[in-house]
C-alpha cells in the first residue's frame, strides 16, 4: 500500500506503537468507508475523505488532521479540444457515487447555467475504465487522484482542465468519543509538519536528537519535556515517526512529486501554502 494516505496511517502506527509495520490496511469503497469507521471495523479512516460539516455533525466522526488540500477537477481526452470546464455544457460526466464530488459537479453546472448528464459508478477503478472506454466526455474527481491516474496513462493524451470547482480539505478521520486517540492522530500530523519546518528529516533525525540545541526540536524529538507522556505514548513518539516515515516534505516527494502534482496550497505556510504545525510545547 503506497501513497500519502498510506504513509499517514504508517505515521500514526509509529507514533502509537513505535513501528510503522503495525498497521493493517482495509480497502474501502466510498459507500462503506464511514460505516466501517462508525462500527469499529477500522480505527482510523484516511481515504481521501473530505472534511464537511455534515460528516462531523451527523455521522459521529471528527477530522483529526488535514493531510492534503485538494479540489474537484475534470479530466478529458485531448481530442475533445475542451480547454475549460465551462466548455463541458451538454457533456456526460463520469462520477463516483456517494462522494462530495457528485454534489460539487451538480452545483458547478447549476451555478454556471450549464447542463450535463451524470454517469454514476460504485468504484474508482470502474469509473476510470468507463472514462477511458469513452462512456463519458469527462471525469470529475479530486485533482490529486486525476493527476495520479493520468500518470498511469501516459499515452492517452489526457488533459486535466484548469478549474478547481471546490475546496476539498482531506485527511484523517476518527470516531467521536475517544479524545486521546483524536489527539494522537492530530499531533502526529503536526509532527510531520513541524519536522519539515525545522529541517529535521529521516536522514538527520538521529543526529538532531543527539546534538541539537534548539528547544523546539528537543521537545519534538523527546529529549526535553514530556509531550509523548501527555499523549499517552513514549516521549520518542515523534522521533519514531520521522525516522521511519520522514517529514511531510519527504512523504510528498516520495508519493506525489513523481506524479507531477504541484504542492500548491500544500506548501508550508512559510512558503505561501496552508500547511503549518501548531506549537509543539
Image (cartoon, grey):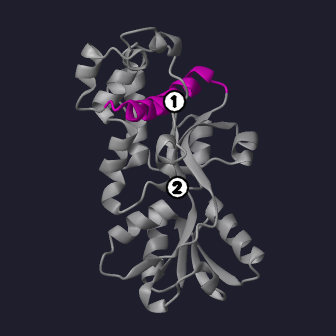
Secondary structure type for disc 1: helix
Is 27 drawn above or below residue 20 in the view shown?
below
Is mark 2 in CB contact (under 8 Å) with mark 1?
Answer: no
Residue 166 shows in the view: yes
The residue tagged 2 is 29
Residue 1 shows in the view: no
Q: Is residue 255 left or right of residue 121?
A: left
- Residue 203: give x, y in percent of width and height: 22, 32
Secondary structure type for disc 2: loop
Disc 2 to disc 1, how far (Cα)? 22 Å
- Residue 127: give x, y in percent of width and height: 49, 72
Residue pictured at 69% horizontal, 45% vertical: 55
Which disc is residue 185 wearing?
1
Tell me which numbered mark, 2 or 1, is placed earlier along the sequence.
2
Residue pictured at 24% horizontal, 21% vertical: 206
- Residue 9: give x, y in percent of width and height: 42, 37
Is 240 drawn above or below residue 3 in the view shown?
above
Q: Is residue 196 left or right of residue 64?
A: left
Mark 1 residue crowding within 10 angstroms, few (<14) / some (14–19) / many (20+):
many
Mark 2 residue crowding within 10 angstroms, few (<14) / some (14–19) / many (20+):
some
Answer with the quarter of the image where residue 35 lies.
top right
Is 220 drawn above or below residue 125 in the view shown?
above
Is 199 drawn above or below residue 123 in the view shown?
above
- Residue 98: give x, y in percent of width and height: 63, 60
Q: Which portion, as a residue range, is magenta?
A: 177-200
Amino acid at each position: 500500500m503506497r501513497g500519502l494516505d498510506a504513509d499517514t496511517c504508517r505515521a500514526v502506527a509509529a507514533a502509537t506503537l513505535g513501528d510503522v509495520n503495525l498497521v493493517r490496511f482495509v480497502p474501502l469503497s466510498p459507500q462503506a468507508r464511514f460505516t466501517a469507521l462508525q462500527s469499529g471495523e477500522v480505527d482510523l479512516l484516511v481515504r481521501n475523505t473530505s472534511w464537511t460539516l455534515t460528516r462531523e455533525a451527523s455521522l459521529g466522526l471528527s477530522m483529526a488532521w488535514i493531510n492534503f488540500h485538494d479540489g474537484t477537477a475534470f479530466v478529458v481526452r485531448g481530442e475533445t479540444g475542451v480547454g475549460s470546464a465551462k466548455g463541458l455544457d451538454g457533456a456526460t460526466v463520469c462520477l463516483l457515487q456517494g462522494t462530495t464530488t457528485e454534489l460539487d459537479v451538480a452545483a458547478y453546472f447549476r451555478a454556471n447555467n450549464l447542463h450535463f448528464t451524470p454517469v454514476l459508478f460504485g468504484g474508482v477503478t470502474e469509473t476510470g475504465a468507463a472514462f477511458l472506454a469513452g462512456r463519458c466526455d469527462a471525469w470529475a474527481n479530486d485533482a490529486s487522484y486525476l493527476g495520479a491516474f493520468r500518470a498511469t496513462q501516459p499515452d492517452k493524451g489526457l488533459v486535466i482542465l484548469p478549474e478547481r470547482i471546490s475546496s476539498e480539505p482531506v485527511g484523517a478521520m476518527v470516531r467521536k468519543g475517544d479524545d486521546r486517540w483524536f489527539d494522537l492522530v492530530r499531533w502526529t500530523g503536526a509532527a510531520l509538519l513541524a519536522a519539515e519546518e525545522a529541517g529535521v528529516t529521516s536522514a538527520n533525525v538521529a543526529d538532531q536528537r543527539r546534538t541539537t540545541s534548539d528547544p523546539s526540536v528537543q521537545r519534538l524529538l523527546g529529549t526535553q519535556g514530556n509531550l509523548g507522556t501527555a499523549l499517552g505514548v513514549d516521549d520518542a513518539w515523534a522521533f519514531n515517526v520521522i525516522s521511519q516515515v520522514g517529514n511531510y516534505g519527504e512523504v510528498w516527494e516520495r508519493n506525489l512529486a513523481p506524479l507531477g502534482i504541484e504542492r500548491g496550497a500544500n506548501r508550508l505556510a512559510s512558503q505561501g501554502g496552508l500547511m503549518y504545525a501548531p506549537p509543539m510545547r
